[in-house]
Amino acid sequence: MKEVENVKLTAPSLRNSIDKRVEISRKRLTKFEKARIIGLRALELSLGAPPLIPVEQEGRGMSTTEIAKQEVGRKMLPLIIGRRMPDGSYIYVPLSDLEIED
């Protein structure tokens, strides 16, 4: 996870869109973005990806959807969300910078 934080952005348009993301886009994760992230992460978990949170080893355990919901709620996924703007450009916002409602 630390590797993602040290990435240098070389494309000026991408760097500018990330710098301006707070002023232009909403600071809250939409219900549509949240649903898509949970669905994609649940699919990854069902295909064998290791969970990023501690999971009960004995007994029933948790479903992949429950694990994905907790990972999103704790902002543990190293994701960057691309938001399309009205002019056709994209704003890239890290999941860790967004407010997540339950």
Image (cartoon, rainbow, N blue to C red):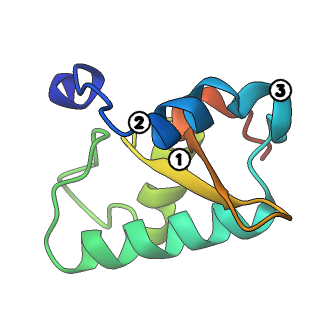
Where's residue 98, x and y in %?
Answer: 68, 34
Seen from the viewer's position, the closer of residues 14 and 44 is 14
Q: Which residue is mark 3?
A: 23
Q: For the residues labelled 1 and 2, say whether their Cβ atoms are less than 8 Å apart.
A: yes
Where's residue 22, x and y in %?
Answer: 75, 27
Question: Which amino acid type is marked by label 3?
Answer: Glu
Left or right, residue 86 beside residue 53? right
Q: Nearer the viewer, mark 3 or mark 2?
A: 3
Badge 1 crowding class, 10 Å Cα cut-off, few under 14, some 14 to 19, many 20 or more, is: some
As measured in the structure, the alpha-carbon distance from the residue carrying label 1 to the one carrying label 2 is 6 Å
Question: Which amino acid type is marked by label 1?
Answer: Val
- The numbered mark, 3 or 1, whose residue comes first in the sequence reads 3
Question: Within the image, what quadrant is residue 7 found in?
Answer: top left
Q: Which residue is mark 2?
A: 76
Q: Which residue is mark 1?
A: 72
Where's residue 29, x and y in %?
Answer: 74, 48
Determine the residue positioned at 24% across, 31% down: 4
Question: Which amino acid type is marked by label 2?
Answer: Met
Q: SS of the residue at dot 2?
A: loop
Determine the residue positioned at 25% across, 62% down: 59
The quadrant of the picture occupied by the N terminus is top left
- Asked whether the viewer can see residue 63, the reply is no
Badge 3 crowding class, 10 Å Cα cut-off, few under 14, some 14 to 19, many 20 or more, is: few
Q: SS of the residue at dot 3?
A: helix
Determine the residue positioned at 27% across, 39% down: 54
Where is 36 relative to 82, above or below?
below
Seen from the viewer's position, the closer of residues 90 and 61 is 90
Left or right, residue 46 beside residue 48? right
